[in-house]
Amino acid sequence: MTSPLDSLAGPGRSLAAEPSDAREFAGLKRSGLVRLQDAAYTGLSLEGRFDLAYNAAHALCLAALRWHGYRPVNRYIVFQVLPHTLNLGPKVWRVLAKCHDVRNLGEYEGDLTVDERLLTDLITACQAVADAVGALPPPEESE
């Protein structure tokens, strides 16, 4: 039976199959957790905390995808496949998808509009991702 991730992999598709790498996984996980911790620091601006939390979520979601042996073609797919990589539902991935859109407006159009509620929802969603990634065993090394 083909997994949903397998069906998204291949030429011209959203994912590329690539063996997991324990060192890469550990680095992405460490980076995500440090950024998530820093995002909680209220002495920073909302925009700075948003940037830290968004990038933490992306690193952790990428770690989960890499754990499964895939590399994304674009940034957004790491959030879309959360039901298949970490068994996380719409309550998490919809927040991350919304934050991806906000991030893109800020990066490409200079319109980063962040409020306390969006930041709180992002940090909560990111913590759910962090908990799920933390429950994964180290990836198996490829021969």
Image (spheres, helix red, strand yellow):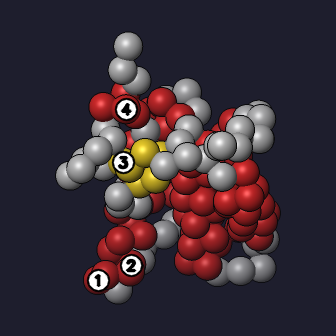
Residue 128 percent location from the top left of the image: 66, 40
State the separation of the CA atoms marked 1 and 2: 6 Å
State the separation of the CA atoms marked 1 and 4: 34 Å
Question: What amino acid is found at the position of numbered circle 3 in the picture?
Answer: Leu
Cβ–Cβ under 8 Å for marks 1 and 2: yes
Relative to 100, does residue 52 appear above or below in the rendering? below
| Residue 32 relative to residue 92: left or right | right
At 39% across and 66% down in the image, what residue appears? 102
**Nearer-N-terminus badge (4/3):** 4
Helix, strand or loop status at disc 2: helix
Which quadrant of the figure contains the N terminus? top left
**Nearer-N-terminus badge (1/4):** 4
At 29% across and 44% down in the image, what residue appears? 10
Residue 110 percent location from the top left of the image: 35, 86
Helix, strand or loop status at disc 3: strand
Which quadrant of the figure contains the C terminus? top right
Q: Which mark is residue 106?
A: 2
Q: Is residue 119 visible?
A: no
**Nearer-N-terminus badge (3/2):** 3
| Residue 24 relative to residue 118: left or right | right
Residue matched to label 4:
6
Q: Residue furthest top?
A: 1
Question: What amino acid is found at the position of numbered circle 1 in the picture?
Answer: Glu
Residue matched to label 1:
109
Residue matched to label 3:
15
Disc 1 residue crowd, few under 14, some 14–19, many 20+, Cα 10 Å: few
